[in-house]
Image: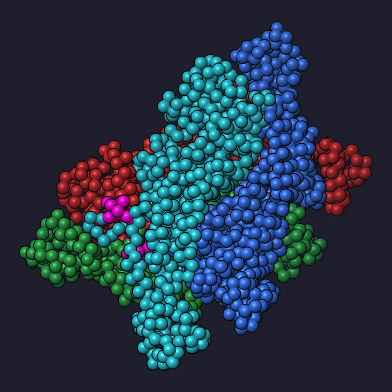
Chain colours: A green, B red, C cyan, D blue
Amino acid sequence: MSGSESDGLFGGLFGRGAVSTGDEAWLQAMLDTEAALARAVERAGLAVAGTGAAVTEAARAYRFDRGELGRQATLTGNPVPALVRALTGLVSPDAANSVHRGATSQDIIDTAAMLLARQGLDAILTDMSAAADAAAALAGSHARTVMSGRTLLQQAVPVTFGLVAAGWLTGIDDARQELRRVRETRLAVQFGGAAGTLASLGDAGPAVAALLADELGLRLPVLPWHTDRLRIIELAAALAGASAVLGKIARDVTLLAQSEIAEVHEGAGAASRGGSSAMPHKRNPVAAVVILGCTRRAPGLLATLAACAEQEHQRAAGAWHAEWQTLADLLRLTGSAASWAAELLAGLQVDAARMQANLDAAAGLPMAERVAAELGPAIGRLAAHDLVAAASARATAEGTGLGEALLSDPVAAASLGAAGIGRAQIDAALDPAGYLGATAEFVRRALAAHQDLEAAWNQ
Amino acid sequence: MSGSESDGLFGGLFGRGAVSTGDEAWLQAMLDTEAALARAVERAGLAVAGTGAAVTEAARAYRFDRGELGRQATLTGNPVPALVRALTGLVSPDAANSVHRGATSQDIIDTAAMLLARQGLDAILTDMSAAADAAAALAGSHARTVMSGRTLLQQAVPVTFGLVAAGWLTGIDDARQELRRVRETRLAVQFGGAAGTLASLGDAGPAVAALLADELGLRLPVLPWHTDRLRIIELAAALAGASAVLGKIARDVTLLAQSEIAEVHEGAGAASRGGSSAMPHKRNPVAAVVILGCTRRAPGLLATLAACAEQEHQRAAGAWHAEWQTLADLLRLTGSAASWAAELLAGLQVDAARMQANLDAAAGLPMAERVAAELGPAIGRLAAHDLVAAASARATAEGTGLGEALLSDPVAAASLGAAGIGRAQIDAALDPAGYLGATAEFVRRALAAHQDLEAAWNQ
Amino acid sequence: MSGSESDGLFGGLFGRGAVSTGDEAWLQAMLDTEAALARAVERAGLAVAGTGAAVTEAARAYRFDRGELGRQATLTGNPVPALVRALTGLVSPDAANSVHRGATSQDIIDTAAMLLARQGLDAILTDMSAAADAAAALAGSHARTVMSGRTLLQQAVPVTFGLVAAGWLTGIDDARQELRRVRETRLAVQFGGAAGTLASLGDAGPAVAALLADELGLRLPVLPWHTDRLRIIELAAALAGASAVLGKIARDVTLLAQSEIAEVHEGAGAASRGGSSAMPHKRNPVAAVVILGCTRRAPGLLATLAACAEQEHQRAAGAWHAEWQTLADLLRLTGSAASWAAELLAGLQVDAARMQANLDAAAGLPMAERVAAELGPAIGRLAAHDLVAAASARATAEGTGLGEALLSDPVAAASLGAAGIGRAQIDAALDPAGYLGATAEFVRRALAAHQDLEAAWNQ
Amino acid sequence: MSGSESDGLFGGLFGRGAVSTGDEAWLQAMLDTEAALARAVERAGLAVAGTGAAVTEAARAYRFDRGELGRQATLTGNPVPALVRALTGLVSPDAANSVHRGATSQDIIDTAAMLLARQGLDAILTDMSAAADAAAALAGSHARTVMSGRTLLQQAVPVTFGLVAAGWLTGIDDARQELRRVRETRLAVQFGGAAGTLASLGDAGPAVAALLADELGLRLPVLPWHTDRLRIIELAAALAGASAVLGKIARDVTLLAQSEIAEVHEGAGAASRGGSSAMPHKRNPVAAVVILGCTRRAPGLLATLAACAEQEHQRAAGAWHAEWQTLADLLRLTGSAASWAAELLAGLQVDAARMQANLDAAAGLPMAERVAAELGPAIGRLAAHDLVAAASARATAEGTGLGEALLSDPVAAASLGAAGIGRAQIDAALDPAGYLGATAEFVRRALAAHQDLEAAWNQ
């Protein structure tokens, strides 16, 4: 837990990216809260001039012994009392009087968690933005790259890879909007004192709270939210939602990268990644696998945070404590998944020829319904259905194509011939590229929505 | 699973309220979707006039054999194909041609789930509104009812019951806003056909989709969302958030209703509830207990839905199917909790005298910090602290009050006397009602925010 | 919730098999508990002869109005008090005196839950036994059916389908043992009275408890376990473990059944299942998909039960109530998955030719490591590695086979020729069937372990 | 993640005790596995003498650069390939040939996880044993300490604190047995090579596997369990079960330690803990709170591991990776809870006088049912019930005791007098110590079961 969460044996996998949730980040966030409080107290006229600056100057993580704070934490159940003592010892008696003024430990930890969340959300949003742009580029450049649609893992009617990427894009953009909504509207300062009344500040409590929010750039809530944890749930849900979207993309990539399908590969940006000197054919989708290694943990962490929201009276006995590392883990893992996803999508190699080959291998069978629909007007709906069904069964049994099966059967051929339908019409009906419906329109819409989002956010 | 979820042995407990998620509700929602699709197809000019009306007329749940649909569902993995066959059989051949036009089973089930969600959210919002009003009434009428604050289940500095109720109110109102946000912006029609391309509709897909959304009053999404399940996560998170808020209230009520605390009781609205003829002293907080029996299940259901959001390609093999009953359970349980909470809060009996008695029994000890702060200016900060700490220890050991301990000690009395501090000042410092800080202001703010919300929503 | 959980729209999917957890099953289990208690009380000499028989005679579910019991349940938080009243009304005054003697509501519900669990476990064990036998048959008959191993969804060194099935078998058998361990050792009668002291029975409590356990064939626990829920967790974990094992099998089947892999298909036992008249090529793996639709819900339900085990004092305020339907759902879903799995495995069609074709399509590349190892002794380890790596890269780039790439390169051919290695040796090294290591031994062991288990259980 | 998990800001809270799951522990466990494999390979005659010793000598965590291993891990998705390279570089060419012989990365990580689990389980079992002994001591010494039973957080019929502690004891002992069962029977070596066939070892695979199991003291499984994760679920469930038992104890302690109940306090062993210099009356139950802060996280982690058990083919793409830190967290948190619980129970202060006072304050009302039962034979069952019910209502309304209410009513007094029942009999019926039923017997049984367990394990 100590050290930086991006270091160590597993940090590159599960702590990649710019989200900071290690001890140093926690400590500095708590100190930033204490410093901002000292400045707020001074601005409220409750401390002599210079107090805020003095505490701010002292409130630097490197000046504190984390191990000692951790040991002291076992006496009170959290590290804040020891931190306050240590911080107080670093400033003049005048300034010392204002340290932690009006606050309780929970105020510091909850507000610090909000600061960690903001830093984490910003880092995640940056990587998600890059991922979205990469998905948009894929959607745009592959708008006409036809491939097999797949439902229940079975080949279905055709789609384009552009549409697949557009689906990823829409998911990412929707997740970004939810992350941003939470960041902008739900990250609020926590400041209530011992039981949420700010009693030790007399009448000055609300003013100090407002100044504290101003100092930190966090929202001022209607009430202290010490045992109203809805904003934690919303934050966690936004993170789990982002994880889910990234997990869906990674799942698709692992499936499309299967040796037998091989329609996409992880890219050259990870030249030496996933390879094996002895097995050059093997290109493990490392990024996608690691993304799933991160995202699979989100639902359990979300459930813990949702369950912990049932908090007693004015401070919970345990449920609050269970939140700290859980939220940090969820931020870290979502951030790591986002960082991996940005690289994955930017470098994804799409094998359009293989997509076409996989379609060809299906020998027209996914198009059976379409062929029947096309033949209907000419030879009757029922007759068309029966003809195509029989031909499909034959094609499946004999391993030939549907077109071949239709045309090689004397009865069918006669029927088709009588209606003036020849190989050209059959081939046209069997062409996947001709059966894409709204695919192009959907890709356009997804790209337009993405551009609108970017435009709105960049104003 | 069949029958109405509010009936049966456990329906009154876990299926109370107006949320409908039983078989009949599912069936009618699927039929409503098919009927709306037929109307949309007609409006798009793809079917003869009267088709929509004919299908709508036929699409009534009572006309279908649910058991048979269920048996047929085992052949395809969902009940829609059998439903489509049965519905088709009820209408003229012309209308039959338009039944299920362009759609796939997932379109029907997902859109039906959105309709169930809308009905459920409306029912929940109604009960949550009543609960909020009841909490607001409690906050207003008990703004000056002083009681002990409690942190880590230990008595802390005083609060008012009005502030406690204001906290409940703010939680409910925040949950309502999130439920409403999801209802207004995230419930979208699902319509993509076999693989999300609407290919069988040719160019007409987007137009039919838009008309379908219009018919049902649901949002039209940028893309079909068959394997982009973020809106399911957001819906589930909003429900779990509401459950968490209600669970916190119920937990507070069970704690405040403990025999040894007895500051609140469940109300006369449930006259015969919770009682025992042989043990008239026993007033089990049945509503609060049942609320917790509902809300404790939300985090696990939320986790399932979040985990199921990793869906493959164009239709998931299992993860989608796992959503149906899970989402229905989450709607039902949140609705039941909301219904119970509305009654609980409307009838809650608050024993202000007992609150005062519990404060009195603490003999001033929770006020020690305040007393020291008050004495500081007169006798010096350090001396005041030592004096009060010693007196507190004595009071705890001897079971006397803090004021008595201060004044009965010769040294302390002399020190206080020299500073001109007598019993009156001590008593004033010990008065919980004098140490409430921003409590009244916070209650005012919560009530004002509630009124603003109501005003905004009632425009 | 009312009605039978195997009926209705979704019962065939998620409530298949013989596990009974609907209202009728709950009601009869509660009545069975009350009846057994009456017999135990009589055997303990606390009631006149005939009491037990009279209560047992009356305790038949069809004689009770479930809806009315459900409505009455809202007054007390559970249906037992109303049930006791109704049951009392059905017997003579003498017998009435013994109804519910010494018991509290929780005794009845918890013991009923144990009875439901036993019935459910028996049903699940029966289906799991059939599934194990089917997996064993597959393992035995396909011990030499070579197929590609796959890691991270990429082709790896070869395995046999027999080994895959042996892995499924071992998983099922391990899960069966855990289910049976819980069934035999952890299903215990709950009987503690109002607060776990059996006070109203005076000294006779333990004797009645022992007789009750004897009547029901349940274990007698050391203590009443009203707020010690470890056995619920163990039961839930055994069920979730079984679900996980079945989910892994279903996941493998969906992957192996992919159109592009097509090595297995769901069987003729479900002739009309998964098919599509218009798309005869499409054979949706319905059973596997529905299994996943069941098993994906187990982790969340398990988490709920584990979280609910933190129960207060002598009866929990809500956590206990949240268990009832959650446990029932977990039993039902595991049972449904087991029932589907038994059919799936019994009918699974294995396409050995396709397995060989998929291996052939890999063109020897998964064997590269083996080829290098074989060449090492002849031409030097390092030289062999370089030779094979270069050939593999060439084979991948040119789409030829590894053997071809090795022999068509003049330098490589010269090197191999000098070492006396020709096409025969290369072909031998490239033969997947020659690189199976312990595969056959592992299959033998799994089958032997299965036979040992069957023998031990059938004694 | 790096560093020791017991250090740092939060390590004292959530990483207390002797469970080791930090980077160093992981690294050494992986090295121990590699070293044991080298020795097994030598013992199997596949390597020259001295190979095992040489690798073992080199396999010391301090010789490896964890940061570098972590960076290299991003190329392959796990740190093993880089570790193998580094280890190979530390030994002679002969020994190097045997490093990682026959193994794949998953073999090393899974077996290392088993070693971590064994160390963790041993540490947890040690602390749980101490906790059990402390609970047994409490049960024994307080077998006659009468206190109020409490159901749904309401006072119910009396129990003894000895029975409460006996319930804790039984829970701990049951959890210990499950932890030990998993430790003894389910921790198995993982050794299957690239796809579970041990192909690169030719015929020697099973022999090397058996020797590896022997070297490490782990079980030899029937098959490699790479994608059969049932033992992970069983391990996780045993840990979550232990957490649940400890969480129940901590919950009871927080409730019994409430200011208004104050029947127990955390002990002198934590003299300076939980106190507040300014509020000496406040004794926060720090240990209990931190235990809950650990145990509340177990269900979500368990759910993640259960969900991850659905693993594809011969190695999972992500689900396996998600297990590593999740399992480590669950071990660490359970260990921390156990360590805190051992201290908590050893030092728990029980206030028997306060227990009596809380009973007295209930004024006999929880005994109403008993009083009626006692009066029945004398004045008729129905009359007795009515008399007591009326008196109870009066006592509740007037705040007097039940005995007083009975005797002060002229009608009741006359009825009682006529039956020869006076104050002495009423007082006897009202004595909680006389209405304990099987309490003493239950305590005896729990203690006997504990002694049996200790005796069996110490043989």
Does the magenta run of residues contain B50? no
Q: Nearer the viewer, residue C376 or B297?
A: C376
Identified at 73% across, 17% down, the residue is: D426
Q: Tell me, yes or no, if residue A9 can be seen here.
A: no
* Residue under the image location 39 percent in, 86 percent down: C422
Residue at the (78%, 65%) spot, across then down: A91
Task: From the top left corner, tell me how far across and down residue B22 is, in percent.
Answer: 39, 40
Q: Quadrant of residue D134?
A: top right
User: Most extreme residue toward the left, as rendered?
Assistant: A418
Q: Which residues are magenta?
A: C255-275
Could you say which is closer to the camera, residue C249 or residue A122? Answer: C249
**Residue C134 percent coordinates (x, y):** 40, 53
Q: Is residue C265 magenta?
A: yes
- Quarter of the rendering occupied by the N terminus of chain A: bottom right
Above or below — where is C410 with respect to C56?
below
Question: Would you say B435 lies left or right of B420 here?
Answer: left
Residue B133: x and y in percent read 52, 39
Residue drawn at x 79%, y 33% as measured from the top left: D353
The total number of labels drawn is: 0
Quadrant of res A13: bottom right
Across and down, in percent, residue B69 comes to 30, 43
In the rendered image, the vertical position of residue C455 relative to residue A36, given as above or below: above
Q: What predominant SS class does the magenta segment belong to?
A: loop
Q: Is residue B120 visible?
A: yes
Q: Quadrant of residue D418?
A: top right
Residue placed most toward the observer, D107 or B364: D107
Does residue B167 appear to the left or right of A41 in the view shown?
left
- In the rendered view, tell whether residue C201 sits above or below residue B301: above
